[in-house]
Structure formats: C-alpha cells, structure tokens
Image (spheres, rainbow, N blue to C red):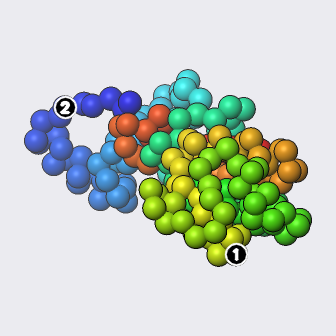
Amino acid sequence: MMPVIRISDATFSDLKTLATWFEAKTPSLAIDKIVQEAMNSLDLERDIIGEAEVGDTPLPNIQFPEAPGLSFTKITKASVDGKKQQRPKWNGLIIEILNSMKNRGMSPEALVDALNIPAEVGLFEQKGFKFYPKLGISIQGQSAQDAWKEIQRISPKWKIPVDVSFEWRDNPKAQHPGLKGQLRS
C-alpha cells in the first residue's frame, strides 16, 4: 500500500505551482521530480528495486517467476502463440489459447474437456457465461488471477506460448500500485 502524507494548504499550493513548472500532470509526479532532482544533486541512487522512475524513461517490467496478485491490473500488451493481441484482456487470452487449440483440430467438446474453468458446449449465457460462436462453447468469466492460473495450466500442455506485460492500477488495494510486470507461460 502506498503511504499517505499530510501537507499544509500553503505547501500544496506551492506544489501545484511546481507541478506546472516541472510539467508534471499531478502534484504526486511533481514530488517525484523534486525528489529525483535532489537525489541526483546529492549523487544518491534509489535503493528499492522496481520503484517508479521519474521522467519519461519507461519502467522496466518486473518479471515474475510465479504470478503475483493480479487484482487491479490491466494488460498493456500480450501475445498468444506468437500473435500480438489487440486490446488484450485476461479472459481474452484464454479465448485466444482456445482459438489456437481449435485451429489444431480440437472439437468444442474437447475444448470444454481441456478447461478447468466452468465451460459448456453450445450457447449458454447465464451465471456469467459468455458464448463464443467461433469456438462453439460458452465460458464463465474469470478474475485476472484465475484467468492467469488457467493460462499457466493449459498453455504449456498445448505448447502455446503466452507473453503478457501488465501494470497495476494506481489503487491502494493493488499489490504494487503503479508498477509494471511481465508474465510468461
């Protein structure tokens, strides 16, 4: 969880002025820039690995050998079976894996049997299920964590590589608010 600090109204007003000067979109980003400039002038480096860097330098993705908490994350880019995904979502990655499996000749019945998440052959749109006509099956929506768990289970079994870059939203309930990560299966 991110720490909370309290500052006077006068200091906050000054901070908004500095945010404009530093071309920072928020007072928080202005503080980041001020701290970074002070660290640079003192020739100090940040000790914590994975903390956000100041400026336009993109953060490196933290690669996780095991899945971290994925609540409050959004996928920034992903590929399934070597194909870049447009506007990827966690559940959509499962669908893309299933498309690859279908392209290898699997029937809708075999696809449902391969899954460890609720799925039905044919049209079924109750209890959070969504029908995928190209696959001929209906699948119940999953949380990001559960979707990744299923991806990790089925992608190696069917030799379908999945690469995901994601970031945690700036939410105090997120495991690493504002940081970026990468998962591979």
Q: Quadrant of the C terminus?
A: top right
Closer to the camera in the image, 45 or 155: 155
Q: How many marks?
A: 2
Q: Which residue is mark 1?
A: 134
Tag 1: residue type? Lys
Q: Quadrant of the N terminus?
A: top left
Across and down, in percent, residue 60 comes to 64, 45
Q: Which residue is mark 2?
A: 6
Residue 165 visible (yes or no): yes
Whether the residues at callouts 1 and 2 have beta carbons within 8 Å, the answer is: no
Q: CA distance from mark 1 to mark 2?
A: 54 Å
Query: Does residue 115 appear to the left or right of 39 in the view shown?
Result: right
Across and down, in percent, residue 104 comes to 89, 65
Q: Of helix, strand and loop, which one carries label 2?
A: loop
Say which residue appears at 65% left-offset and 40% top-offset. 149
* Mark 2, other Cα within 10 Å: few <14 / some 14–19 / many ≥20: few
Residue 34 visible (yes or no): no
Across and down, in percent, residue 74 comes to 52, 54
Say which residue appears at 72% left-offset and 32% top-offset. 65
Farthest-out residue, bottom: 133
User: Looking at the rendered structure, which numbered label has been put on residue 156?
Assistant: none
- Vertical order, 25 against 178 (above or below): below
Which marked residue is nearer to the observer: mark 1 or mark 2? Answer: 1
* Mark 1, other Cα within 10 Å: few <14 / some 14–19 / many ≥20: few
Across and down, in percent, residue 42 comes to 49, 28
Mark 1 and mark 2 lie on one chain; the one further toward the N terminus is 2
Tag 2: residue type? Arg
Query: Does residue 22 appear to the left or right of 97 in the view shown?
Result: left
Q: Of helix, strand and loop, which one carries label 1?
A: loop
